[in-house]
Amino acid sequence: MTRLILALLACCVCFSVSSKDFTRFSTAKKHLIKTLPNNAKSLYCGCDIKKQGKKLVPDPTGCGYVPRNTFTRSGKINQRALRIEWEHIVPAWEFGHQLQCWQNGGRKNCRKVSAKFRKMEADINNLAPAIGEINADRSNYRFGMLGEPATQYGQCNVKVNFKQRVVEPPLYARKQIADAYAYMQKTYGLKISKQQQKLFNAWQKQDLALKNTTNKL
């Protein structure tokens, strides 16, 4: 099990801090699709990612992903369950709410008037490929630990508690998430609550301990 988790850690798209700056989210996404490694995995499920033209799609056969909702409320196929989207690990809502532009008109206004927001939204160090349905379900919920078993998405070990508005990511994704928050904090002055900071510090230490244990095997 430990070796499996480490394999997922190695394949999960964990971009080293990039100095390449973008000022448009759409441009950043195009760059990421173009430069996506062949062994890339989706953030929350560890699914292989395939390219279909200019689009990315998850391969559920190896990761056991099963959509929470196969169909939409209108009875149509849930297309977001069939595609890869670029997830803001630190949600745009979270960093946007810390800027005055958001208070004066939300995301649309920030894109229009704030160069800082545009840069934050397009920063590839805060973006990761995720199955669209899970990206939608995560919304702007905070990360945390949940007691219930992971059963919502087949064999994917991600949990979403809609009532508490909390998401628990799988073990192999936690360091990437913690690192993204640390990066946004250092680069843009992102404010993080003491509770979240404590959680992210624990995740980084947990990852280090896991690697040290494996090296001794």
Image: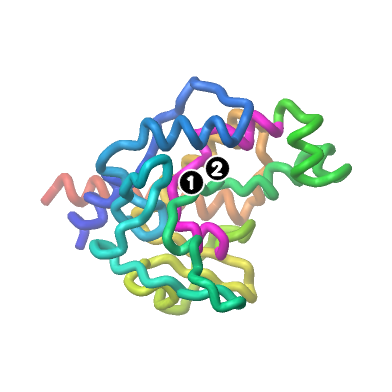
Residue 66 is one of the magenta-drawn residues:
no
Work out whether residue 150 or residue 83 is closer to the camera in this orientation and state it: 83
Residue 13 % position (x, y): 36, 42
| Residue 162 seen anywhere in this rendered image of the structure | yes
Q: Is residue 117 above or below residue 1?
A: above
Write the start and end of the magenta stretch as one range. 117-137
> Could you tell whether 39 is left or right of 57 in the image?
left
Q: Which residue is mark 2?
A: 181
Residue 152 lies in quadrant: bottom left
Quarter holding the N terminus is bottom left
Give the percent coordinates (x, y) of residue 124.
Answer: 50, 34
Which is nearer the eye, 50 or 22? 50
Task: Tell me which secondary structure the magenta stretch mostly adopts.
Answer: helix
Is label 1 in contact with label 2 (beta carbons under 8 Å)?
A: yes
User: Does residue 169 appear to the left or right of 121 in the view shown?
Assistant: left
In magenta stretch: residue 132: yes
Find disc 1 in the rendering and name its residue.
178
Q: Residue at x 80, y 43 (%)?
A: 102
Q: Is residue 10 above or below residue 61?
A: above
Q: CA distance from mark 1 to mark 2?
A: 5 Å
Q: Is residue 173 above or below residue 74?
A: above
Residue that appears at 53% across and 73% down? 76
Q: Nearer the viewer, residue 214 or 183?
A: 183
Picture residue at 61% right of the left edge, 56% below the top: 195
Percent coordinates x, y for residue 90 in the rendering: 58, 46
| Outermost residue to the right | 104
